């Protein structure tokens, strides 16, 4: 019954949302790829004999990056992997990471779309990374007898409260998964509350931890400065910021700049459409500034640097002595993943609204690798303390790197649980 209702409601909701989606993508200059998501690929490479085909579904950039080691493990076990991602930035990252693998736009959840995608991809196993659960494709693959795994699963508090209003529906959906691995015990309990099968739901950890821990060194910093043409100094890198946070960070930086003459700031807005507004804000504050996308010979004389390019933030955290992680100070917040700077061995500061990564930030705080600073005044005080006490900052960075190392191994544990599905497919 719930599936029938969903099949009726989904097209109606989509049609109502269509004008908004079209306008949003025109404003952001992003193609929606409706045809590709509705009709599916024109052709797919034939399946290789004896090699199970795994359909790996990753919502966006973060999920694609989280899946890197898992894809390597799947291919090492003899599987061939087809990757789909819902967002353009996710598909670009997947195509860059796996240039020889098929990378597709994830299907819309219309019956026609799920039927065409299932036929074209012809998977032996679906592996859905973290979130982006669409019932239509799950029901389709269930009828075809294709096993389905939700790995490194997380449900934000806001989504969880919304899902609970229609818990009977989500109970049916969650029971379609043959395996669920949760990032934390808190996440597992949420999944069980929504109806996941306790026998099929395990706590494995977050796949994002399985990244290389490469602590920033003076040698790495020198290479990055030579490449960018930026000056020596003590760097603060503020990553994945959102409108409203730039004012807080720049305000604190202006206060600090009067005391620390060698201080530099790299400001990295999360969204491409915020680059220009961040640049205009920096100019209104009369700060000597440069843009990564428009280098000039005079950049060595600047103090604020705008990262207005995509895909470079992780590497450029290597400049920093202190890192800030955005989407955690203003508005609805939710936070962004703190693992990139933590893996560089940096003290990580964030605001009070990092609830999308509640478990991760809680454990990072307990490990002594991070600080939660609620407002501009607290941010200013914390930065001043770390700049005045470099040994303390280095110790926090060491603890942050150890925090990442301690929680690694999720890809290997997940692969152990997926192996029986691959064996049956063979």
Image (spheres, helix red, strand yellow):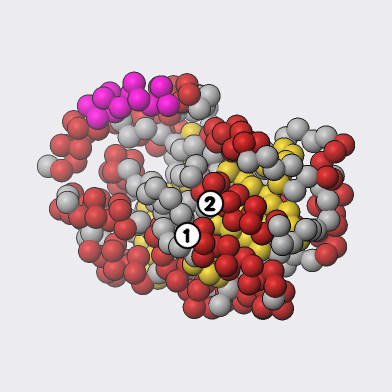
User: Circle 1: is it few (<14), some (14-19), or many (20+) Cα within 10 Å?
Assistant: some
Residue 261 placement: quadrant: bottom right
The answer to whether residue 295 is above or below residue 426 is above
- Position of residue 399 in the picture relative to residue 14 (left or right): right
Q: Is residue 364 left or right of 342 when viewed as pictured?
A: left
Measured from the top left, where is residue 165 in percent x and y?
A: 17, 51
Query: Dot 1 corresponds to which residue?
Result: 375
Q: Position of residue 51 (x, y in %)?
A: 55, 50
Relative to the observer, which residue lies in front, 374 or 211?
Answer: 374
Q: Secondary structure at mark 2?
A: helix
Q: Which residues are magenta?
A: 12-24
Quarter location, residue 339: bottom right
Write the residue at 40% across / 37% down: 118
SS assignment for the magenta stretch, majority:
helix
Mark number displayed over residue 248: 2
Question: What residue is rendered at 49% in x and 78% in y?
Answer: 366
Q: Is residue 287 found left or right of 221 in the rendered image? A: left
Q: Are marks 1 and 2 in contact (CB under 8 Å)?
A: yes
């Amino acid at each position: 019954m719930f599936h029938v209702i969903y099949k009726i409601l989904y097209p109606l909701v989509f049609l109502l949302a269509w004008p908004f989606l079209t306008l949003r993508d025109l404003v952001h200059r992003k193609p929606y790829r409706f045809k590709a998501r509705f009709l599916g690929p024109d052709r797919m490479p034939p399946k290789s004999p004896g090699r199970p085909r795994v359909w790996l579904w990753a919502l966006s950039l973060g999920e694609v990056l989280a899946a890197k080691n898992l894809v390597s493990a799947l291919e090492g076990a003899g599987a061939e992997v087809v990757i789909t991602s819902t967002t353009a930035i996710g598909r670009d990252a997947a195509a860059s990471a796996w240039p020889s693998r098929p990378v597709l736009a994830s299907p819309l959840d219309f019956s026609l779309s799920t039927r065409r995608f299932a036929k074209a991809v012809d998977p032996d196993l679906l592996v859905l990374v973290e979130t982006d659960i669409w019932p239509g494709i799950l029901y389709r693959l269930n009828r075809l007898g294709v096993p389905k795994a939700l790995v490194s699963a997380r449900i934000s508090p806001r989504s969880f409260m919304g899902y609970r209003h229609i818990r009977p529906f989500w109970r049916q959906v969650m029971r379609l998964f043959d395996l669920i691995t949760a990032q934390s015990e808190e996440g597992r309990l949420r999944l069980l509350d929504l109806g996941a099968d306790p026998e099929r739901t395990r706590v494995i950890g977050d796949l994002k931890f399985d990244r290389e821990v490469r602590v920033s060194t003076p040698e790495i910093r020198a290479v990055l400065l030579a490449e960018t043409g930026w000056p020596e100094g003590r760097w603060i890198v503020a990553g994945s910021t959102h409108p409203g946070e730039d004012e807080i960070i720049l305000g604190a930086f202006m206060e600090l700049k009067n005391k620390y003459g060698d201080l530099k700031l790299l400001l990295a807005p999360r969204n491409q459409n915020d680059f220009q507004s961040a640049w205009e804000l920096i100019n209104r504050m009369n700060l000597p500034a440069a843009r990564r996308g428009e280098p000039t010979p005079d950049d060595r004389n600047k103090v604020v640097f705008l990262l207005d390019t995509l895909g470079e933030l992780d590497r450029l955290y290597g400049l920093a002595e202190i890192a800030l992680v955005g989407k955690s100070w203003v508005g609805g917040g939710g936070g962004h993943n703190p693992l990139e700077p933590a893996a560089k061995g940096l003290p990580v500061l964030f605001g009070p609204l990092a609830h999308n990564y509640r478990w991760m930030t809680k454990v990072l705080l307990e490990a002594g690798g991070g600080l939660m600073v609620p407002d501009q005044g607290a941010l200013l005080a914390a930065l001043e303390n770390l700049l005045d006490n470099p040994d303390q900052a280095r110790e926090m960075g060491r603890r942050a790197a150890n925090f990442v190392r301690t929680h690694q191994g999720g890809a290997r544990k997940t692969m152990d649980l997926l192996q029986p599905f691959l064996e049956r497919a063979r």
